Amino acid sequence: SWITVTSGSTGSGNGTVTYTITANSGAQRVGTITIAGQVHSITQSGVSPCSYAITPASLSFSASGGPGSVTVTAAPGCNWTATSNDAWITITSGGTGSGNGSVNYTVANNTTTTQRTGTITVAGQTHTVTQNGLQCTYTISPTALSYTAAAGTGTVNVTAAAGCTWTATTTDSWITITSGTGTGTGTAGYSVSANTGTSQRLGSITVAGQTHTVVQNGTSSCSYTLTPSSQTFTAIAGTGSFNVTASSGCNWTAISNDSWIFISSGNTGSGNGTVNFSVDASTSTSQRTGTITVGGQIYTITQSGIVCPATPVMQSVGCSLAANLISNVNYQWYISGTPIIGATSQFYTANQPGFYSVFVTDITNGCTASSQPAYVACSGVGVEEFGLADAINVYPNPSSGSFNIISSGIFTSENVKISIINVYGQSVYTTHVAPQNGEIKLTVNDAVPAKGTYTVLFTSGSTQVAKRIIIN
């Protein structure tokens, strides 16, 4: 029934028989036509079923979430869809496709302490997403406070991630907790009763597992002087000391009010004495100030922030890459956001085309800086030097998230791959476009997950052209 003779069903002498066959939507089939007692066999191939593969099959994320990507491998013409099966996983691009492609998605913050698992169904395959629960860590500030003999009140600031609970407790009868529970960042409050004795007394409050020390002077007429009253440090770790001047019999306690300052000796004393301390190395670029309290007097410590290396500048000639010379740093070359093993000098010779960048790390403080990635084609010119970029218009630029792409006369292929690359050389968006009469017109709506500078890379066969766009 799938073979129809259209002409030559009868004849005399020499002649021709013409026939047609219908499309086959099933397996391979064989049919025949009998012509003048002779058999003409016809074999028609069946439809090859579409098969799909995805990589990777799973990804893991921290509690803070972030972007992820799945690559789909399929034959041309094989259509597929991607569906998130969990509300905290959002597909940002690649929800549908045909043939090879990719699916991009984001994972929301996990505000609980419990690990969770979700899935995305991509082309009938399951991609599993595992996200760790919130890891609760706590810091308190200040770590100590001093009071006169009179009654008083105090507060302790607690820094913790949302969803992390904490309590404040004390075993000292002269200290009363006035607000002692919280979730995430908050404040614990307390009060101290008047000290009617002549001696100084020491108490403590446990806040989120950390110790806050409370020092209260007695009713004696003791006075204390600290010399010097302050000291300044660079960002590296260091030690210091100061003298305490007090009358004989006047007891005192030295309390660090910051976690990066440690009393090494002279924690307690009577009369004149010396307090020795050390400071941790700073890991921040900002200056910080801390204090030590002795006998109700404040000793101030100021520490400079670390100085990060200058942003490296990368240059390329063919496959030869070079970074500018920066003192006291280690170099590390990257391709498409992945470190290149052994590429740790100022120079590197590329062995494949791709987006290259170089990171520098300060040997003393570990602060890093990176160059902008640049495409290196290992052919003596960069991707933006092919003379074709001027024929592509990406606008508005800068953009708030959505922008248009128009090109004319560059690409004639049926399939032009358009990728958006971040500063680490990672693709955050990919699509395929078929030019119409040599023209491409495309609107990209909010496909870029964060503000910054991106490269729009056009690939057609061996031709690649790049344009820069700023998302603000």
Image (cartoon, helix red, strand yellow):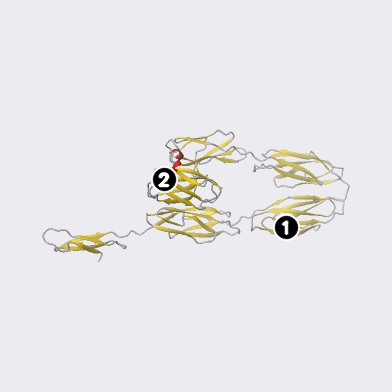
Q: Is residue 315 left or right of residue 275?
A: left
Residue 122 in sight here: no
Q: Which residue is painted at 68% across and 40% down in the image?
A: 304
Left or right: residue 239 compared with residue 216: left
Question: In front here: 96 or 67?
Answer: 96
Residue at 39% across, 43% down: 462
- The residue indicated by pointer 1 is 168
Q: In front here: 397 or 178? A: 397
Give the total number of marks visible in the rendering.
Answer: 2
Residue 40 x, y percent position in the rendering: 19, 60
Residue type at mark 2: give it: Ser
State the image coordinates of residue 96 (x, y, percent, origin top left): 44, 57
According to the picture, the residue beneath numbered tag 2 turns out to be 408
The relative height of residue 195 versus residue 277 in the rendered view (above or below) is below
Amino acid carrying label 1: it is Ala
Which of these two is toward me, 401 or 78? 401
The spot of residue 217 in percent (x, y) is 83, 50
